[in-house]
Amino acid sequence: MNNNLQYLTDESGNKTAVVVPYREWLALNKEHDRLKQLVKIKSNLKSAFVEFENLKNGKEKLITLSDFLDES
């Protein structure tokens, strides 16, 4: 990211906002979307591993494919 940022300040000189060049804003949004997707994937994987451990330790009951399809 370039340092083409502009800062808006109040009467006391406190920064209140940032103006980001549009191309940089688009790049930031694209990276943000990529990171959100990565977090979602990691969360789903973590849930899957927890569920697997619970099944392995007998804390959850296995269901058959037929039972699973009947629930839908």
Image (cartoon, rainbow, N blue to C red):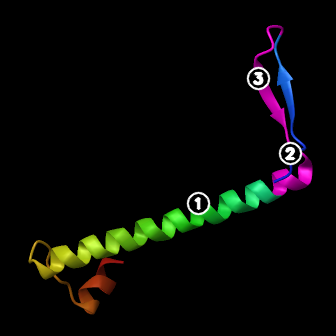
Image quarter where the N terminus lies is: bottom right
Give the CA separation, mark 2 to mark 3.
17 Å
Front position among marks 3 and 1: 3
Q: Which amino acid type corresponds to the residue marked 2 in the rendered image?
A: Asn
Number of the front mark, 2 or 3: 2
Tell me the SS state at disc 1: helix
- Judged by depth in the image, the label closer to the viewer, 1 or 2, is 2
Answer above or below: position of 42 versus 1. Answer: below
Q: Residues within 10 Å of mark 1 (few under 14, many from 20)?
A: few
For this orientation, the residue located farthest to the front is 3
Whole-number angstrom distance, CA of label 1 to CA of label 2: 25 Å
Q: Name the residue beneath numbered marker 3.
A: 16
Q: Secondary structure at mark 3?
A: strand
Closer to the chain start, of discs 2 and 3, is 2
State which region is magenta. 11-26
Q: Residue at x 91, y 46 (%)?
A: 21
Which is nearer the eye, 42 or 70? 42
Report if residue 24 lies within the magenta region: yes
Mark 2 highlights which residue? 3
Amino acid type of disc 3?
Answer: Thr
